[in-house]
Image (cartoon, rainbow, N blue to C red):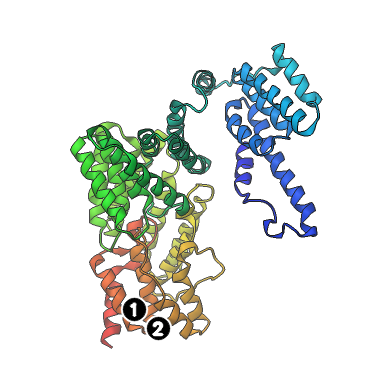
Amino acid sequence: APERLRAALGEWRGPAYAGFGAADWARGERSRLTELRLRAVERRAELLVELGRAAEAVPDLDAHLTEHPWREESWRLLALALYRTGRQADALAVLRRARVLLAGRLGIDPGPRLRRLEAGILAQDPDLDPPGEPADPAARLWARATEAYDRTVAAGSRARLESTVGLLRSLAVTGGGGLEAAREYRMTAVQAAEETGDAELTARVIGAYDVPANWTRSDDPVLARRLVDAAERTLGALPEGPATEAARCRLLATVALESRGVRSPRGPRAAAEAEGIARRLDDPALLAFALNGVFMQSCTRAGLAPRRDTIGAELVALGARHGLVNYEVLGHLIRLQARSARADFTSADEHATAVDRLAERHERPLVAVFTAWYLALRRAATAGPSAGSHDSAEAAYRSAAARLDGAGMPGLERGLLPLALLGLRLAHGRPAEVDPGADWGPYRPWAEPFALLAEGRSTEARNALRALAEPPPDLLYEALCCAEAALALALDDRPALRRTHDRLLAASGELAGAGSGLLTFGPVDGWLGAIRRALEA
């Protein structure tokens, strides 16, 4: 229930009916929705306290009361949460602060629930004690460690800030809500570090989030841009010298990672510089982080799957030799992708099996999302032209797509299924069928011309084709080039045909799009041949 409430609150965007502030009809509904949201914050905190997770409720309640100090129930919950984490003095201080604020601003005394809680804390009433300890030993250890940490490490301290990033890093590899929570709070931690004015601390906070990334499109481009800006500011403020080389490497790797999918010379330059520093320092963990940035910047043109395979091989070796499990997982996934691009499914199968074993042993649930998509890709790539084979491949794609629901990876999820189904049809020589109402996400510019063409609006389709930008530098570069080629062939647009031919040529011998490990538009050579025949006609 707390996680469902957190997800619901995450959907809230600013004041209700903000564009109709002066309208009489909006006032009542705005008040109702606002109250519903505030109560949801309190209900989530209440549940966390009841479930023995009081320490988790404290930060959100603190922030909530900064904006809504008249909420007596929030004051009560915050005081109770503090008491249950062993912070009796802080709990009493909160209740006294509530008394002063209510009397000073509203001219009223605290209500009976607040008064009873204060009396109970002063008397150390056993009814206020936390619920019974969980039976699971790991859960007991976690609860005790959390309480001890809250008692001994001061709120707002630098140690607490750095350890928070470590927790976010661990959350991110759990997938789903953990990944979303890590993304949500990461920038908050960076901002808090920047506010200290300590560039070295900020560098540690930014660089500590060395979570391996396998998908070359950002889940949150706005957040990514803000992180890049913070890393660049910190690079400018960091003192020069050997003592800060490792921190500089992590900042550069962060720039490379968070610039993924963006066509700019800065990302590749930052990746190369980070790799150079890491190799010079001979630090395996640092090198693995830097190589992740190099991988993210290895999609600037078609035909770079062999380069990515080399990166993946080094990550597998580094991870296995130095106990860097997350990077060993990443290396296998990269090699699975690269081998798929070359239609080497025997090797790709070996990497899929190896990474599934690692994921099971080390509890990495997101891996199963990628291997499920790989199996769908494999079926699509090896399916014959019959209707049964086509339907089987389509069902595999739909089953893989279902795994993305709740995985916390919108940059991967949005538009992926309709693009995969389009590629399946085109690879099998079938006419494109594009549902304009589907969520095409970032791939809509390549889908809309097909829809216009199906409606007989050839001139508009041609204009849309000519307005297409070069595909972004990510793992679906070749797939989108083939989608553009299919449009150019249908419209006999020679400039577009020549453009797509030149872009695809370096990927000759590959399966278009299969370097993603997710989908394919069929052999690149088939597309190149069709383009040449059209240009020669």
Farthest residue, direction bottom: 537
Nearer-N-terminus badge (2/1) = 2
Residue 241 picture quarter: top left
Distance from label 2 to label 1 (Cα)? 10 Å
Horizontal relation, residue 187 to residue 351: left or right: right
Q: Position of residue 156 (x, y in %)?
A: 50, 28
Mark nearest the camera among 2 and 1 is 1
Residue on which the image places disc 2: 491
Residue 345 can be seen, yes or no:
no
Q: Position of residue 362 (x, y in %)?
A: 40, 34
Q: Position of residue 528 (x, y in %)?
A: 27, 74
Q: Position of residue 259 (x, y in %)?
A: 36, 53
Q: Residue at x 41, y 35 (%)?
A: 197
Horizontal relation, residue 261 to residue 147: left or right: left
| Image vertical order of residue 220 relative to residue 49, above or below | below
Residue 289 can be seen, yes or no:
yes
Residue on which the image places disc 1: 496
Residue 384 picture quarter: bottom left
Q: Residue at x 65, y 33 (%)?
A: 45
Q: Residue at x 70, y 29 (%)?
A: 75
Farthest residue, direction front: 104
Quadrant assignment for the N terminus: top right
| Image vertical order of residue 114 relative to residue 342, above or below | above
Q: Residue at x 48, y 55 (%)?
A: 413
Farthest residue, direction left: 280
Horizontal relation, residue 210 to residue 443: left or right: left
Looking at the rendered structure, the secondary structure element under dot 2 is helix
Mark 2 near mark 1, Cβ–Cβ under 8 Å? yes
Looking at the rendered structure, the secondary structure element under dot 1 is helix
Q: For mark 2, does the 10 Å Cα neighbourhood hold few (<14), some (14 to 19), or many (20 or more) residues? A: some
Question: What is the total number of numbered labels drawn onto the structure image?
Answer: 2
Horizontal relation, residue 442 to residue 520: left or right: right
